[in-house]
Image (cartoon, grey):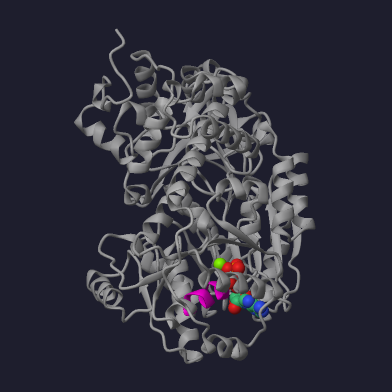
């Protein structure tokens, strides 16, 4: 009996009771439909075991060997570490698990064991960290060469539980046709819905996965483009309700700045002024490579609105960035005696602080408001919001942008992005915006010097950093990531920081920054780093967006092979922001030809647009198994760079659909229309969570 459908609650699944339901809900899974679209973030391929002598740092590998000596448990009660040694003819490997003291009993029998885990470098050499256990070893043979889905997990949710639930759901329901009209499926050679769902969760071969993924990515892009087109229809050509005059104070401000605007900054500022004084409200995207000086352009636009008696708001994707913009802007307003008040509004402020900020925003006392998502919360009411700026837009969806715009009466919209998406793609993704490009860097910059090295170079790299620090500079180190769990991530950064501390020696202050830290703690560290009280900042990719510390001159990126080119370029953009010669060290444990070729592109070029183009060219279908994502706009499966071809097809399909049946009322388009309506009606706030 097929009795479930996509709208059924997940309690319908056998084995999911009240408690499990709560856990699934935390991961956003409420219905069977949510479950089916809870896609794996990768697949494990259980390849042949290697010998102990062959293990390589930075890789996930399988080793088969004899349990050697006794299993030991040490560490603090909160963080017990279980240690085991496995031995084969080529050597002995240390293996550790976190918080699993019971393994001591399980593994006490000794004998042959197979372990699959990541090889990392610890103080005492190469170690296999937190591996999956196959004991007895025959259990591994059953999984050999199969693709096993790996789901994104939250506390309490196990991979096994998700896998089981998905299987049961698929066995107990008719999947139906999905939302794509057959004509579209046929013209673009896309998989049937049922085929796609099965293939994304449980592909038997790679081809099946590619085929499934292509359909689902296409669907995701198509919905995005259609909803963009449909909202655009309503908002096309809104008349400019503001009557702004030229402001002398801005000219004076520019005169007093210690630098001259670049040609690109000047021309974008001219465009913005024309937009804001034109017949229609502005909707403009400014694409400027990292370090091209977007903030000052945004500030000019905000001052323009402020001096004309209105408010301007700027939304940044992280608290750290919002605070940095705020401090920066407040400082400039006071230094250059601009009679405007800056206000900060972020989620981590105390209730009292927020209340006071809300009051100043509502009364109009605050002119330029800088913040995070908190800016679009219900309680934030503006007196006269005439300009909305979103910084590093790729982190925000169209919905958030619109929600902020909804706080005013047709405000001007300015979107800043450091992501050099090729123009053809930008037109598809930002169809509703005019696009300006800032290709020029400020003249005082020296090009960043790059090098790609293997892990044997580490000692030299540390010595180089020490020398730079002695010369007064600061350094970033981007830490190896472990995606398996956030907890391990934090563990790794802490461990690694200790290693760096020892390598740097006395007198050099080393601190670490990772996603699991409390906001206040992160802010303190960033502030101390900005003041050069900290010389080396070891961090996960949380520093990726927008941080501006011009005195930082070296960035070393560990495991660079695990990042997309675009992301590496963003990371590198944290240095080379001042007058000092800056350096970027790409550290890579991988010896593959492909990795070398990719990193070589960064080595050769500091031009984001060129890099993005090369990234597109180099990415083959084989890349889809990696976890690398460009991180541009949060699509669930699709990746704007990687899936550029699918994006183009989806755009073509959207155009054809709307040309032929603009209101999408034909029967075959009905499921699509329904889905769109559902999406457009979900409140903007929901999507921010
Ligand atoms: P991004 O475009 O990456 O957001 P920022 O706006 O943070 O870059 O600017 C990077 C740094 O360059 C800042 O310290 C800023 O003060 C400085 N800067 C901006 N414009 C110029 C310019 N025309 N000449 C020199 N320095 C500039
Ligand atoms: Mg910026």
Q: Is residue 570 left or right of residue 493?
A: right
Camera sees residue 649:
yes
Farthest-out residue, left: 18
The count of marks equals: 0
Q: Quadrant of the N terminus?
A: top left
Q: Locate residue 408: give its quadrant.
A: bottom left
Can residue 66 be seen here? The reply is: no
Q: Residue at x 37, y 47 (%)?
A: 687
**346 in relation to 244, above or below:** above
Relative depth, front residue between 245 and 632: 245
Judge whether 229 appears above or below 5 on screen: below
Front-most of residues 170 and 648: 648
- Percent x, y for residue 158? 37, 33
Q: Residue furthest top?
A: 1
- Say whether residue 425 is magenta: no
- Residue at 70% x, 63% y: name it: 584
Query: Quick one: 70 or 597, which is closer to the camera?
Result: 597
Where does the image place residue 285, in percent across and percent down from the top left? 56, 60
| Residue bounds of the magenta highlight | 295-303
Quarter assignment of residue 240? bottom left
Q: Residue 281 location in percent, x, y?
A: 48, 64
Q: Residue at x 37, y 22 (%)?
A: 164
Tell which of 107 and 489 is nearer to you. Answer: 489
Magenta span dominant secondary structure: helix
Image point 40% across, 47% down: which residue? 74
- Quadrant of picture, ligand 1: bottom right
Q: Quadrant of residue 485?
A: top left
- 89 to 680, vertically: above or below: above
Whether 561 is drawn above or below 382: the answer is: above
Residue 296 inside the magenta-drawn segment: yes
Percent x, y of residue 602 = 74, 55
């Amino acid at each position: 009996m097929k009795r479930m459908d996509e709208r059924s609650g997940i309690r319908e699944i056998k084995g999911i009771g009240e408690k499990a339901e709560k856990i699934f809900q935390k991961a956003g899974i409420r219905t069977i439909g949510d479950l089916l679209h809870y896609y794996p973030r990768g697949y494990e391929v259980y390849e042949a075991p290697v010998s102990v002598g062959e293990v390589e740092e930075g890789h996930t590998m399988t080793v088969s060997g004899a349990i050697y000596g006794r299993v030991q448990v040490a560490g603090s009660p909160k963080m017990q570490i279980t240690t085991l040694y496995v031995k084969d003819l080529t050597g002995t490997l240390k293996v550790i698990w976190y918080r699993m003291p019971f393994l001591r009993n399980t593994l006490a029998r000794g004998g042959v064991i197979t372990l699959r885990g990541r090889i990392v470098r610890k103080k005492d050499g190469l170690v296999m960290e937190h591996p999956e256990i196959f004991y007895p070893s025959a259990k591994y043979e059953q999984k050999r060469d199969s693709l096993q889905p790996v789901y994104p997990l939250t506390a309490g949710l196990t991979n096994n539980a998700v896998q089981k639930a998905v299987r049961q759901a698929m066995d107990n329901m008719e999947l139906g046709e999905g939302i794509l009209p057959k004509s579209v499926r046929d013209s673009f050679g896309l998989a049937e819905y049922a085929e796609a769902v099965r293939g994304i969760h449980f592909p038997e071969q790679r081809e099946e996965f590619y085929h499934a993924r292509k359909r689902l990515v296409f669907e995701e892009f198509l919905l995005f483009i259609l909803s963009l087109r449909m909202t655009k229809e309503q908002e096309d050509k809104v008349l400019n309700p503001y009557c702004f005059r030229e402001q002398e104070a801005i000219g004076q401000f520019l005169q007093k700045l210690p630098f001259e605007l670049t040609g690109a900054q000047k021309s974008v500022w001219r465009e913005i002024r024309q937009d804001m004084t034109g017949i229609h409200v502005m909707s403009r995207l400014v694409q400027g490579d990292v370090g091209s000086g977007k903030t000052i352009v945004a500030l000019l636009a905000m001052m323009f609105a402020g001096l004309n008696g209105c408010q301007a708001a700027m939304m940044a994707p992280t608290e750290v960035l919002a605070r940095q913009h705020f401090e920066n802007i407040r400082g400039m307003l006071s230094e250059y005696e601009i009679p405007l008040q800056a206000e900060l509004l972020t989620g981590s402020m105390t209730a009292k602080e927020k209340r006071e900020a809300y009051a100043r925003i509502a009364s109009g006392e605050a002119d330029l408001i800088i913040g995070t998502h908190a800016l679009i919360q219900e309680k934030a009411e503006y007196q006269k919001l005439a300009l909305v700026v979103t910084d590093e837009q790729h982190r925000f969806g169209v919905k958030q942008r619109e929600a902020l715009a909804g706080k005013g009466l047709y405000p001007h919209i300015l979107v800043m992005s450091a992501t050099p998406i090729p123009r053809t793609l930008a037109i598809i993704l930002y169809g509703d915006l005019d696009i300006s490009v800032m290709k020029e860097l400020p003249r005082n910059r020296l090009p960043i010097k790059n090098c790609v090295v293997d892990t044997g170079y580490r000692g030299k790299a540390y010595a180089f950093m020490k020398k730079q620090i002695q010369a007064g500079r600061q350094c970033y180190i981007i830490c190896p990531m472990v995606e398996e769990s956030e907890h391990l991530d934090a563990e790794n950064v802490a461990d690694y920081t200790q290693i760096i501390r020892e390598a740097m020696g006395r007198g050099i202050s080393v601190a670490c920054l990772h996603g699991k830290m409390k906001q206040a703690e992160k802010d303190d560290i960033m502030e101390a780093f900005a003041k050069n009280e900290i010389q080396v900042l070891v961090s996960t990719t949380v520093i990726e967006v927008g941080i501006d510390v011009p005195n930082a001159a070296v960035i070393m990126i560990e495991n660079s092979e695990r990042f997309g080119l675009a992301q590496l370029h963003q990371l590198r953009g944290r240095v080379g922001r001042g007058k000092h010669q800056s350096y970027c060290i790409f550290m890579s444990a991988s010896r593959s030809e492909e990795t070398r070729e990719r990193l070589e592109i960064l080595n050769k070029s500091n031009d984001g647009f060129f890099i993005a183009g090369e990234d597109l060219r180099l990415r083959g279908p084989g890349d889809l198994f990696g976890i690398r994502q460009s991180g541009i706009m949060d699509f669930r499966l699709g990746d704007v760079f990687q899936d550029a071809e699918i994006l183009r097809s989806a755009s073509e399909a959207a155009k054809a659909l709307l040309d032929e049946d603009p209101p999408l009322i034909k029967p075959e388009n009905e499921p699509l229309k329904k889905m769109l309506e559902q999406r457009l009606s979900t409140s903007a706030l929901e999507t921010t969570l």
